[in-house]
C-alpha cells in the first residue's frame, strides 16, 4: 500500500542530502500535511518488526565530493505499532543543493507486505520522490525533477542497519554540468 506522506522526508532517504557548489537555490520545507493511511494490523507486520531494529536517532555528515562541501545530518526513526506506521524526521545542515538547508523533513513510511518500507511523495525540496527500503535495508531514492533552477534530479542508493546508514548519491544539473556526487554516513 502506498500513500502520500506528511511533510517532507527523508530517510533516505536518509539520506541524502547534498550541497551543490555555490548555487543560490533554496531548498524549502513542506508546510502542507496529508493524513497518513494506516495499514491493517496484519499488513506489513514484517516491515514494522524490521523497522523496530532501525528505531532511534542516527547522527552524521553528508559530503558533496564534487564541490567539497559538507553538512550535518540527523535521522530519527520511530515505530508506531498501534497505528502500523514508521515516522521519520530528517534534519540537514549545510548548504543543501547550494542553498539554505530546509527545516526538519517529516515523513511516514508505508510498511509493505514484503517486509520493506515505502515513501511516495511530492517534497518541496526534491519534487516527486520515491524512496524504498527493502527487507535487507537497501535504500533507493529517486527524485527525477527537483524544483530548482539549477538541480534537475537527485538519486541515491545505500543501506540502513540497526547501527548505521551509508549512502551515495548523484545530482544532475539542468545546464548539463557534470554529475555531482555525495556520500552520507550516520551512526546510532
Image (spheres, rainbow, N blue to C red):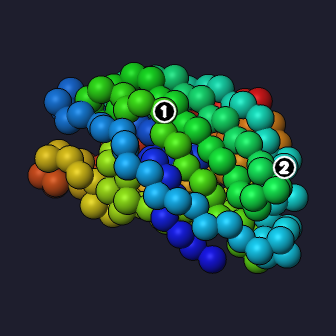
Q: Residue drawn at (30%, 37%), measured in percent from left and top?
A: 27
What residue is shown with label 1? Answer: 104
User: Which x, y percent locates residue 154?
Assistant: 37, 53
Tell which of 32 and 11 is nearer to you: 32
Q: Residue drawn at (45%, 47%), measured in percent from left and top?
A: 8
- Alpha carbon separation for disc pair 1 and 2: 22 Å
Q: Quadrant of the C terminus?
A: top right
Q: Looking at the image, is 90 positioned above or below residue 4? A: above
Q: Residue drawn at (37%, 42%), measured in percent from left and top?
A: 31
Name the element at disc 2: helix
Q: Where is residue 81, by image quadrant?
A: bottom right
Give the left or right position of residue 54, taking residue 62 as reference: right
Tell which of 105 and 54 is nearer to you: 105
- Callout 1: few (<14), some (14-19), or many (20+) C-alpha neighbours within 10 Å? many
What residue is shown with label 2? Answer: 52
Tell which of 114 and 1 is nearer to you: 1
Amino acid at each position: 500500500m502506498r500513500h502520500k506522506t506528511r511533510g517532507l522526508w527523508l530517510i533516505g532517504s536518509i539520506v541524502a542530502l547534498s550541497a551543490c557548489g555555490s548555487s543560490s537555490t533554496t531548498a524549502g520545507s513542506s508546510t502542507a500535511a496529508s493524513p497518513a493511511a494506516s495499514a491493517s494490523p496484519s499488513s506489513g507486520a514484517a516491515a514494522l518488526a524490521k523497522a523496530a531494529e532501525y528505531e532511534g536517532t542516527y547522527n552524521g555528515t553528508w559530503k558533496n565530493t564534487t564541490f567539497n562541501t559538507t553538512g550535518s545530518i540527523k535521522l530519527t526513526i520511530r515505530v508506531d505499532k498501534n497505528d502500523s506506521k514508521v515516522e521519520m524526521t530528517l534534519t540537514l545542515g549545510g548548504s543543501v543543493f547550494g542553498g539554505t538547508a530546509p527545516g526538519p523533513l517529516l515523513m511516514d513510511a508505508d510498511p509493505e507486505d514484503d517486509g520493506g518500507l515505502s515513501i511516495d511523495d511530492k517534497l518541496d525540496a526534491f519534487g516527486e520522490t520515491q524512496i524504498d527500503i527493502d527487507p535487507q535495508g537497501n535504500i533507493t531514492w529517486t527524485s527525477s525533477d527537483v524544483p530548482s533552477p539549477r538541480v534537475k534530479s537527485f538519486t541515491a542508493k545505500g543501506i540502513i542497519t540497526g547501527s548505521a546508514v551509508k549512502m551515495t548519491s548523484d545530482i544532475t544539473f539542468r545546464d548539463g554540468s557534470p554529475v555531482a556526487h555525495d556520500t552520507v554516513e550516520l551512526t546510532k
